[in-house]
Image (tube, rainbow, N blue to C red):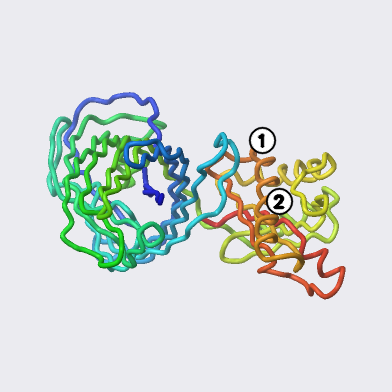
Amino acid sequence: MTKNVKRLFPAILILALAVPATAERLSFYFEEGEQYRILSTVHQNVYVNGTFSHRAQILNRISVHVTAVDGDRGYHESTFVTSEESRGAFEGVFAWGQEYQSEYWRDPQGYYEIDPHYFVPVVRDVPVFPDRELQPGDTWSSTGHEVHDFRAGFGIPEPYRFPIPVTYEFIDTVMRDGREYARIRVTYNVFYRPSQTYPGLTYPVRITGFSDQLHYWDIAAGRVQEYEEEYALVFLLSDGFEFVFEGTAEARVIEASRMDRAQIAEQVREDLDELGFDDQEVVEDERGVTIRLDNILFPPDSAFLRDSEKRKIEAIAEILVRYPDRDILVSGHTALAGTAAGRQQLSGERAAAVADYLLELGVRERDQLIQRGFGATEPVADNETPEGMRRNRRVEITILEN
């Protein structure tokens, strides 16, 4: 049996210029309507009973919208998409993975008020700050929590929560791109013996591990901008098996103003006309602006991209590079033919072929492209006619809202 621990907000360490030490009051700030996304990549090794099992890369894409402010607290509505790749050379675009929704309040010190039925965020009440000014060199401590989804691995139906004793150190302040950041060291060591049992299931009886993180705290914005992490978690299970998850992670925040979807859709239509794409649909919805392409042609039952189709994708790439702050979703769709499993696999492979070529063209970084196969579950035409089936065999490229 294998499972994975998925870290949902680990960052990138970038050289910065140190500034003279000053006292700072570090706290979270919230503005109603603000939106941003967090892109996190995890590099993880998994061991079972002391033997290497597999290596994985995990992409976490977290969209955050502060929908209300009450005093100095902010109400967050978030979508977490976590995608894992456990095979190959880790060079292609990640596939769309598990999707979670979450809503919660967070106060200026960083503490959460969240309904216990939510599985995410995984790490909560980290970082938190004392209600006083801090000097470089100051330390403080608090109790955070980790929450994991063990439904698939162990059959545990509810979010699995355990405490983490966290220690903080305010290292210094640095200037980067005209903004001031506080560098915060965040560490915790876990030794936890759960008291809860799950009759008939396999469950943790001891959890140990550590996390060593470096946060870049944007002082003016009142939130973490980037961080990097080294971690290990060891789960001893009730059946005697031991699972070890260890690795590194990095994350960054990307801010983007709300899209003028109507304007972008109209501009994309004009661009497609100029590029010679006839009868291609451009659709706007809550996800963003989607280009529907039913003239990206593949050989039957194949995801091989002919040179002629690559030229079409290169033309689309000219449009996509004009919106560099938006992530891209490439979706594959099939007509209603063959088996459901076959359709799902083929649609995913074709989406991956297009997304990987966009990555090769440099349209986005790897963590800003994602692919997803839908099989025949989202038809746009009648599958009873040849013309309808042709339209349903399509690739969609979505410029995402957030």
Which structural element holds mark 2?
A: helix
Picture coordinates of residue 22, whole percent (x, y)? 18, 31
Q: Position of residue 377 (x, y in %)?
A: 66, 69
Label 1 element class: helix
Is residue 199 rendered to the left or right of residue 176?
left
Classify 10 Å Cα crowding around label 2: few (below 14), some (14-19), many (20 and above): many
Q: Nearer the viewer, residue 55 or 202?
A: 202
Q: Is residue 179 left or right of residue 278?
A: left
Q: Which residue is mark 2?
A: 350
Front-lying residue, 114 or 336: 336
Residue 311 percent coordinates (x, y): 81, 41
Q: In the image shown, does 349 or 225 lie closer to the viewer?
A: 349
Say which amino acid is labelled 2. Answer: Arg
Sequence-wise, the earlier of marks 2 and 1 is: 2
Q: For residue 372, which quarter of the picture? A: bottom right
Q: Give the CA distance from mark 2 to mark 1.
A: 15 Å
Residue toward you, 12 or 150 = 150
Q: Find residue 88 and report its image quarter.
A: top right
The residue at the point 83 percent across, 50 percent down is: 299
User: Does 105 sit above or below residue 246?
Assistant: below
Front position among marks 2 and 1:
2
Mark number, residue 83: none
Residue type pointed to by label 1: Glu
Name the residue carrying label 1: 360
